[in-house]
């Protein structure tokens, strides 16, 4: 039986026992919880991302429907992911960049879609809007004017969810069609990575 990785964004009441009920609901459906990431806790509710190993006996929509049976629980999205829980991909990325800072932007663009369960990423030249490098599945042309912002932003264009983070004279754009819009916690994670990558790249350039 083929096992797939799914990520589900779940909104639930922030009170004792609810998380256990959700975990039991996953278990009843044959989904093995590999990781839970808390995105926010506010006004008596929490938003968590669950990464599960799933045999796909039922559709992802049916899995979401069954989990939503738990009182007060709402599944906001369910989509495939390549992010391996517990693998410390952020550290691995930074390690690769530290070993070869001259390829910092290329390494970042290739790695970041898997880090946030997205589909593709590109680095745009801030001056010309040209795609400097794109990851697998990235389009050859991206409407740069919409993404070259002065600060990290997340927005939606049609069915495409986008996050844009400036990196000096380059803009990193990450896209996700399957799944929900980028949460502030995801945008902050990418922005922090970009900050560290910039430091590593500068340090490497000074040593060269």
Image (cartoon, rainbow, N blue to C red):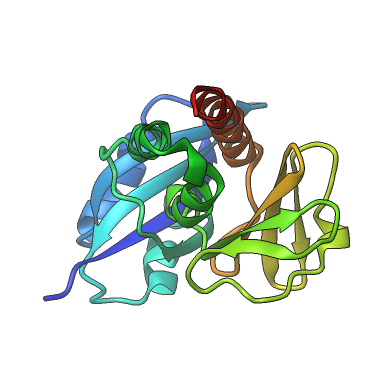
Dividing the picture into quarters, in which one does residue 60 lie?
A: bottom left
Residue furthest to the left in view is: 1
Q: Is residue 45 visible?
A: no
Identified at 66% across, 38% down, the residue is 184
Identified at 30% across, 76% down, the residue is 58
Q: x, y percentage for residue 156?
A: 75, 61
Q: Is residue 41 above or below residue 161?
A: above
Q: Choose between 84 and 72: the one closer to the eye.
A: 84
Q: Is residue 127 above or below residue 47?
A: below
Identified at 29% across, 43% down, the residue is 85
Residue furthest to the front in view is: 208
Identified at 26% across, 40% down, the residue is 87
- Looking at the rendered image, the quarter that the N terminus falls into is bottom left
Count of all numbered marks drawn on residues in the image: 0
Q: x, y percentage for residue 15?
A: 47, 26
Q: Is residue 133 above or below residue 189?
A: below
Q: Is residue 50 visible?
A: yes
């Amino acid at each position: 039986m083929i096992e797939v990785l799914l990520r589900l964004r779940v909104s639930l009441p922030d009170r004792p026992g609810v998380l256990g009920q959700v975990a039991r609901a996953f278990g009843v459906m044959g989904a093995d919880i590999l990781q839970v990431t808390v995105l926010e806790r506010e006004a008596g509710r929490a938003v968590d991302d669950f990464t599960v190993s799933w045999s796909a006996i039922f559709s992802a929509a049916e899995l979401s429907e069954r989990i939503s049976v738990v009182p007060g629980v709402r599944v906001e999205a369910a989509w495939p992911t390549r992010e391996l829980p517990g693998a410390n991909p952020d550290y691995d990325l930074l390690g690769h960049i530290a070993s070869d800072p001259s390829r910092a932007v290329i390494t970042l663009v290739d790695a970041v879609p898997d880090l946030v369960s997205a589909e593709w990423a590109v680095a745009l030249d801030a001056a010309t809007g040209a795609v400097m490098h794109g990851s697998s599945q990235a389009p050859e042309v991206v409407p740069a004017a919409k993404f070259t912002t002065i600060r990290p932003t997340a927005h939606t264009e049609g069915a495409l969810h986008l996050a844009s983070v400036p990196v000096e004279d380059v803009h990193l754009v990450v896209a996700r069609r399957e799944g929900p819009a980028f949460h502030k916690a995801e945008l902050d994670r990418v922005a922090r990575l970009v900050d560290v990558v910039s430091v590593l790249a500068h340090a490497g350039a000074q040593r060269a």
